Amino acid sequence: MSTTMTGMPRLGLAANAAQFTLLVVVNALVGGVLGSERTVLPLLAEQEFHLTAYTAALTYILAFGATKAVTNFFAGTLSDRYGRKPVLLAGWLVAIPIPAMLIWAPSWGWIVAANVLLGVNQGLAWSTTVIMKIDLAGPDRRGLAMGLNEAAGYVAVAATAMATGALAAAYGLRPAPFLLTAAYIALGLGLSAVFVRETRGHARHEAAIHTIGEHHAGLSTRQVFALASWREPALSSASQAGMVNNLNDGLAWGLFPILFATAGLSLTEIGALAALYPAVWGLGQLATGPASDRYGRKPFIVTGMLLQAVALAVIALADGFTAWAVAAVLLGAGTAMVYPTLLAAISDVAHPAWRARAVGVYRLWRDGGFAVGALLAGIVADLAGIRAATWVVAALTAASGLLAWGRMYETHRRA
């Protein structure tokens, strides 16, 4: 832990560079665990378990999203009560059985159960790395901090989606892709246990010197939930935008590989498309996060949501690898504008004393979008096809951007 001469923690990226970098690596491993499913599981549902109904095939995303959403909420509360590092370690320990369950699953119920554990893993581990980086960064460079955090996670999602697609093409859908998952979990647990340091003291130090903002420190969890869900315009606008963002990501994860496969694309091409969207999303955040520190959060949030809507419309209209690749780039760019900026906006408004809980509530709503997206997209796809489901989600994404434009205020004081 970086401290001052008086023993107080020091805030800022430069003062905490080593620990911040370690947390970036840890979050990349968290993202890699998630990415190991994106190419393989939709095809596994169709080819090995013969699930013909889209709603049934998407049950694993529904289980993952619902579990992760609830776990996000408790991750914030638990990290305030017990510290950040114990929650991070718990997230890795829960992940240990996942690769074996995916490799040897005799029925689809085992896949769904593995994704319940995956939701707990992602909710605890990813949420905690976010909170720890916010603790270390201090108030001035949170956009950059969140850009680095989310870039690491989603570049790892993209790289692993492509790698598992190649492994599946060469060696089959099981077990080879999920051996990579096991390696990520072992390395993440080891690094977290041995090298990661507790950061709750940084948040307490910032709370002691916090002098800006209209919301005081002494709020209950119920009050924080109300502020972040509907009462506070910026916090609640961020929550709804995050939910819709992950609603369309649930669609991309669960149904786009099937859409591409029915159009005759190869496993390698499907893996490339599954990787391209999160790759642009991940790398783009290296630019959009720090840019929001300079130009403000709201322009990136509104524009990003509207750009995602355009990209989804292109996917619904297109019918070939090149057009879908262009749309994947647009979808990734729009998501890159939104993802780190929403987290930074939450951190701008929330008092350090309850910031971890506010992040937990935001991530509850945001990752609840996976569950809502899986259910909505599955039902519409069963009734009218995948393209119709894509049009519905495109419309919801555009409406979300317009709502943020009308209700949200600028949260970054330097903007």
Image: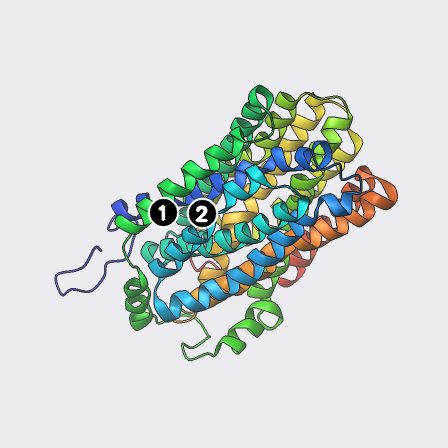
Amino acid type, callout 1: Leu
Q: Residue at x 31, y 69 (%)?
A: 204
Residue 238 seen in the current view: no
Residue 330 % position (x, y):
63, 34
Could you give the CA–CA distance between mark 2 and mark 1, rounded to whole angstroms?
A: 9 Å
Is residue 219 at all visible to an observer of this figure?
A: yes
- Name the outermost residue toward the right: 383
Query: Mark 1 packing: few (<14 Cα in 10 Å), some, or many (20+)?
Result: many
Asked whether the beta carbons under mark 2 and mark 1 sit within 8 Å of each other, the answer is: yes
- Taking the spot 51% from the left edge, 73% from the top edge, the residue there is 224
Please report the residue visible at 72 percent of the width from the left and 28 percent of the height from the top. 260
Q: Position of residue 92 (x, y in %)?
A: 41, 50
Question: Can you say whether 146 is above or below 239 in the image?
Answer: above
Q: For mark 2, give the secondary structure.
A: loop
**Location of residue 386 (image quadrant):** top right
The residue lying furthest to the left in this view is 5
Q: Is residue 278 left or right of residue 326?
A: left
Colouring scheme, one of rainbow, by chain, secondary structure, one colour: rainbow
Q: Position of residue 8 (x, y in %)?
A: 20, 65
Position of residue 361 relative to residue 95, above or below, is: below
Residue identifier under label 2: 96
Residue under the image location 52 percent in, 29 percent down: 176
Q: In terms of image quadrants, where is residue 174?
A: top right
Q: Which mark is residue 209?
A: none
Q: Up-down: is 314 above or below 63?
A: above
Q: Categorize mark 2 by other alpha carbons within 10 Å: few (<14), some (14-19), many (20+).
A: some
Q: Is residue 204 above or below residue 280?
A: below
Residue holding disc 1: 189
Task: Name the amino acid type tagged 2.
Answer: Ile
